């Protein structure tokens, strides 16, 4: 397990459409901080509108890091993100500025707060053998194998999640210990967790309205054209990029699966569901301090509240 030194870092998170970008910029100015993105989709170049990436003006106002670092056809692992975040934080500190993480990917937040299990290096030959077994013996074979040696991990994984099943079996074969044992620390807070971990918290009805406005604005700004350009690129979109919220639905629209109006409605519904899952994640992290919000968002006043509460 490993984590970056976090005692002097600040974190601002919250569900989608909660106002993180605006509050983050105001907070960074108050702290004399630079922002490190904590958004798994903002990593991808060209995926701008659907990810609500900070605008060029916002990025000019406050330095941002870990935005536009990989191409849409590439994958980017959690371990790669944590390592890059470590480097960004070290660079910011060397300039004598504070580090402010801003974003809504709960897994990134949890990994930064509690570290991750890095595990043995990938073994391509072993992975191919396990994948061949799944094809030879049929769906569910790897899940049954994992259940026999690591029932805790098997209980968390879907029988069709071949990638994670292969990794769990790879860890067991390479180390002789179940991956669930290694992951225990990931589920426990540090003995002295950082104090500056804030989550913007809206009443459900207000958040739904904010989400609907956000989705309408993304489509009005040209989300369909953005996805069309990405799909026409020289290399196919990665699995992660294709499954990104908003992009998956628009790709289906472009394939003729459904009309634009229905597509917009589906993106709104899926975004609300995603926001609910985000909130569940945040409430499972004891490090989080929730910031109740209501009515019109005033980013500067919210930033002042956070600094006063800290």
Image (spheres, helix red, strand yellow):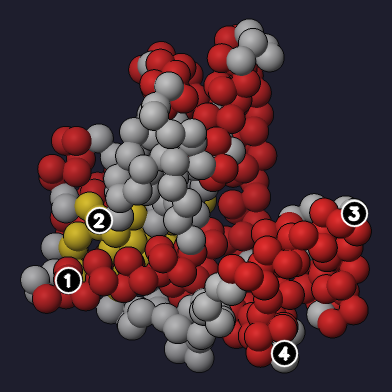
Residue 185 shown left or right of residue 114 in the figure: right
Mark closer to the chain start, 2 or 3: 2
Residue 91, labelled with which disc?
1
Say whether residue 77 is left or right of residue 153. left
Marks 1/2 in contact by CB < 8 Å: the verdict is yes
Q: Nearer the observer, disc 1 or disc 3? A: 3
Query: Which residue lies under the disc numbered 3?
Result: 138
Gap in angstroms between the C-alphas marked 4 and 3: 26 Å
Q: Earlier in the sequence, mark 4 or mark 2?
A: 2
Q: CA distance from mark 4 to mark 2?
A: 36 Å
Q: Quadrant of the C terminus?
A: bottom left
As drawn, 222 above or below 298: above
Marks 4/3 in contact by CB < 8 Å: the verdict is no
Instruction: Residue 184: tell me if it is visible.
Output: no
Identify which residue is drawn at 67% across, 59% down: 163
SS at badge 1: helix
Q: CA distance from mark 1 to mark 4?
A: 36 Å
Judging from the image, what secondary structure is the residue with disc 3 in? loop
Q: Position of residue 156 (x, y in %)?
A: 78, 66
- Going from the N terminus, do you reach mark 1 or mark 4 first? 1
Q: Nearer the viewer, mark 1 or mark 4?
A: 4
Evaluate if marks 2 and 3 touch, with contact meaning CB atoms under 8 Å apart: no
> Where is residue 146 drawn, in percent x and y?
83, 73
Q: Position of residue 274 (x, y in %)?
A: 62, 42
């Amino acid at each position: 397990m490993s984590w970056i030194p976090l005692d002097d870092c600040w974190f601002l998170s919250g569900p989608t459409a909660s106002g993180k970008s605006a509050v983050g910029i105001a907070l960074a100015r108050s702290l004399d901080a630079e922002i490190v993105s904590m958004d798994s989709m903002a990593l991808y170049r060209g995926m701008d509108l659907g990810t609500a990436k900070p605008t060029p003006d916002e990025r000019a106002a406050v330095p941002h890091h870990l935005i536009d670092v990989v191409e849409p056809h590439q994958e980017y692992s959690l371990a790669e993100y944590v390592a890059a975040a470590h480097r960004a934080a070290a660079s910011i500190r060397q300039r004598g500025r504070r580090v402010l993480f801003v974003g809504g990917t709960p897994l990134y937040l949890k990994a930064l707060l509690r570290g991750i299990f890095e595990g043995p290096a990938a073994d391509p030959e072993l992975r191919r053998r396990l994948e061949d077994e799944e094809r030879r013996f049929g769906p569910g074979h790897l899940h049954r194998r994992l259940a026999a040696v690591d029932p805790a991990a098997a209980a968390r994984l879907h029988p069709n999640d071949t990638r994670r099943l292969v990794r769990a079996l790879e860890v067991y074969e390479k180390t002789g210990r179940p991956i669930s044992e290694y992951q225990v620390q990931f589920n426990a807070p540090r003995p002295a967790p950082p104090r500056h971990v804030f989550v913007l918290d809206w009443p459900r009805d207000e958040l739904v309205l904010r989400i609907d406005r956000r989705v309408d604005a993304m489509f009005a700004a040209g989300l369909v054209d953005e996805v069309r350009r990405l799909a026409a690129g020289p290399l196919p979109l990665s699995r992660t990029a294709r499954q990104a919220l908003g992009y998956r639905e628009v790709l289906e629209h472009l394939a003729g699966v459904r009309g634009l109006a229905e597509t917009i409605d589906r993106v709104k519904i899926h975004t609300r569901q995603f926001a609910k899952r985000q909130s569940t994640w945040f409430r499972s992290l004891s490090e989080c301090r929730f910031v109740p919000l209501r009515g019109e968002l005033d980013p500067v006043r919210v930033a002042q509240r956070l600094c006063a509460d800290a």
